[in-house]
Image (cartoon, rainbow, N blue to C red):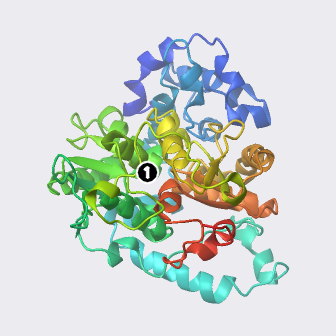
């Protein structure tokens, strides 16, 4: 029988804290769908204890059960003993990787595409070409689409379009705020951590994040040597590769000359804030404060008004942390917008109110709080690739909440959530756009089409400014 693994062995104290109270059963999205005890946190802790005690090996069945976790952290939120089940499960996956159970395709992606970084842009461009000239023309009943399940892809799945050029290729390394914008305490300088999805698939969300920072009087550095934060890698248990990737990013961010790091990706933010130090063992993490974009804008007390061009310094900070819901436009001309809380932001980082403050301050937005806004959408990063049917089942509950809210746009602070919700809503036949908070806030009015991106938001393009 194999040993449990280095990472898992040092986490025994976490397993010993669990008292099997069952609080986790009420909030686990996986348990809600399949109802098996081994799918919930206390069941997984019991399995891990059995491995640590030598009663169970790192078997195929153990591997299968440990993978049934979205890492949504809902169980941690309700645990009376503060049991970090997320760290325990990831350490168990690390033990499985040490035992040689990392699948070939994941090993190739993690250790060649993600770790080296420079191979990702060519892969993204190849994917963009394939999508534009091959998949786009295939009808729903095409025999080629019928073959997709043979390679593990649901034939009805709606995939995002890869960008023709990555965000990193299209921007300079330093993007100063306009000279017309002056911060009261001088011009702060932040490093923007882009994230893989924003770089390869949603560059418009990255551009909007830069614009919002510039409007707030912030100079932005985009370190060109940054790479994947490592979230998908250590979530799969490959801690060794994840540490190499973390080292590269820490060096890039510290060399930027910035006073803080800002990202608009919930998972990247959690990784840089917590996981580098507490999971991967880098004592000082990135060595400077890390903020979600919405958190940073609220902390600074201002972002440029979404309803006007940057003009005089006194006019460039139309948003404040104490902003009340705007009544500039009557409700009949406003766009109905809701917000989905990414798990890694609301529970992982404790950021809840800041995105809502920004949305409520947009004059042409009618903010609607949807039911169970902080319930997991079912994406879970690569979970939706390996467990798509289960991911869809979890996602359907979120779709119904969005339907009940009767909105035009869903905003969020996680590109993986954008991907998942766009797929789920499209399959449900709902014409609801899913975009980042920054994309919405950066618009100068409901009819703004200057960026050329409003085609993706039919609800925005058709509204009155």
Residue 119 placement, left or right of 134: left
Q: Is residue 366 above or below residue 148?
A: above
Residue 267 makes an appearance in the image: yes
- Residue projecting furthest to the right: 141
Along the line of sight, the residue nearer the viewer: 293 or 385: 293
Residue 224 placement, left or right of 88: left
Along the line of sight, the residue nearer the viewer: 190 or 256: 190
| Residue for point 37% across, 24% down | 10
Along the line of sight, the residue nearer the viewer: 50 or 316: 316
Q: Is residue 289 above or below residue 49?
A: below
Q: Secondary structure at mark 1?
A: helix
Quarter where residue 462 is shown: bottom right
Tell me where residue 377 appears, x and y as whole percent. 66, 46
Tell me where residue 42 appears, x and y as whole percent. 62, 21
Residue 18 placement, left or right of 193: right
* Residue at numbered disc 1: 233
Along the line of sight, the residue nearer the viewer: 298 or 86: 298
| Residue for point 33% across, 50% down | 262
Tell me where residue 127 appears, x and y as whole percent. 54, 78
Tell me where residue 233 appears, x and y as whole percent. 43, 51
Crowd band around label 1 with a 10 angstrom C-alpha radius: few (<14), some (14–19), many (20+): many
Q: Is residue 105 above or below residue 383?
A: below
- Name the quadrant of the C terminus: bottom right
| Residue for point 68% across, 82% down | 135
Residue 55 makes an appearance in the image: no
Report the number of discs.
Answer: 1
């Amino acid at each position: 029988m194999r040993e449990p693994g280095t990472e898992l062995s040092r986490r025994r104290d976490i397993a010993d804290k669990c008292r099997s109270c069952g609080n986790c059963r009420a909030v686990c999205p996986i348990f809600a769908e399949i109802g098996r005890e081994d799918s919930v946190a206390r069941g997984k802790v019991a399995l891990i204890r059995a491995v640590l005690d030598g009663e169970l090996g790192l078997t195929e069945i153990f591997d299968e059960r440990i993978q049934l976790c979205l890492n949504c952290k809902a169980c941690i939120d309700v645990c009376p003993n503060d049991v970090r089940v997320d760290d325990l499960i990831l350490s168990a996956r690390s033990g499985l990787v040490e035992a040689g159970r990392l699948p070939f395709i994941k090993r190739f992606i993690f250790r060649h595409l993600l770790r080296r970084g420079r191979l990702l842009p060519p892969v993204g461009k190849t994917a963009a070409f394939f999508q534009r000239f091959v998949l786009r023309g295939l009808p729903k009943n095409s025999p080629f689409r019928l073959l997709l399940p043979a390679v593990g892809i649901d034939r009805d799945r709606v995939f995002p379009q890869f960008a023709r050029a990555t965000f990193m290729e299209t921007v300079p390394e330093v993007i100063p705020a306009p000279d017309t914008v002056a911060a009261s305490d001088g011009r702060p300088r932040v490093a923007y951590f882009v994230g893989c999805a924003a770089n390869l698939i949603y560059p418009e969300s990255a551009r909007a994040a830069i614009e919002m920072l510039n409007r707030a009087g912030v100079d932005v550095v985009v370190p060109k040597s940054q790479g994947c934060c490592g979230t998908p890698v250590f979530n799969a248990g490959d801690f060794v590769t994840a540490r190499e990737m973390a080292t590269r990013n820490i060096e890039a961010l510290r060399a930027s000359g910035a006073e803080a790091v800002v990202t608009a990706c919930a998972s990247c933010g959690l990784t840089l804030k917590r996981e580098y130090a507490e999971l991967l063992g880098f004592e000082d993490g990135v060595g400077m404060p890390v903020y979600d974009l919405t958190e940073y804008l609220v902390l600074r007390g201002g972002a440029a008004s979404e309803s006007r061009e940057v003009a005089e310094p006194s006019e460039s900070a139309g948003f404040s942390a104490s902003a009340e819901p705007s009544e500039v436009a009557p409700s009949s001309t406003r766009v109905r917008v809701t917000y989905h809380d990414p798990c890694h932001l609301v529970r992982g980082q404790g950021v809840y109110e800041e995105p809502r403050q920004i949305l409520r301050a947009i004059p042409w937005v009618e903010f609607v709080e949807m039911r169970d806004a902080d319930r997991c959408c079912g994406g879970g990063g690569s979970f939706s690739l390996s467990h798509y049917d289960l991911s869809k089942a979890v996602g359907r509950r979120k779709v119904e909440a969005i339907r009940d809210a009767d909105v035009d746009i869903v905003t969020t602070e996680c590109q993986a959530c954008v991907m998942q919700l766009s797929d789920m809503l499209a399959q449900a036949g709902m014409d609801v756009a899913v975009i980042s908070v920054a994309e919405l806030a950066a618009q100068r009015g409901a009819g703004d089409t200057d960026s050329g991106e409003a085609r993706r938001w039919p609800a925005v393009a058709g509204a009155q400014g």
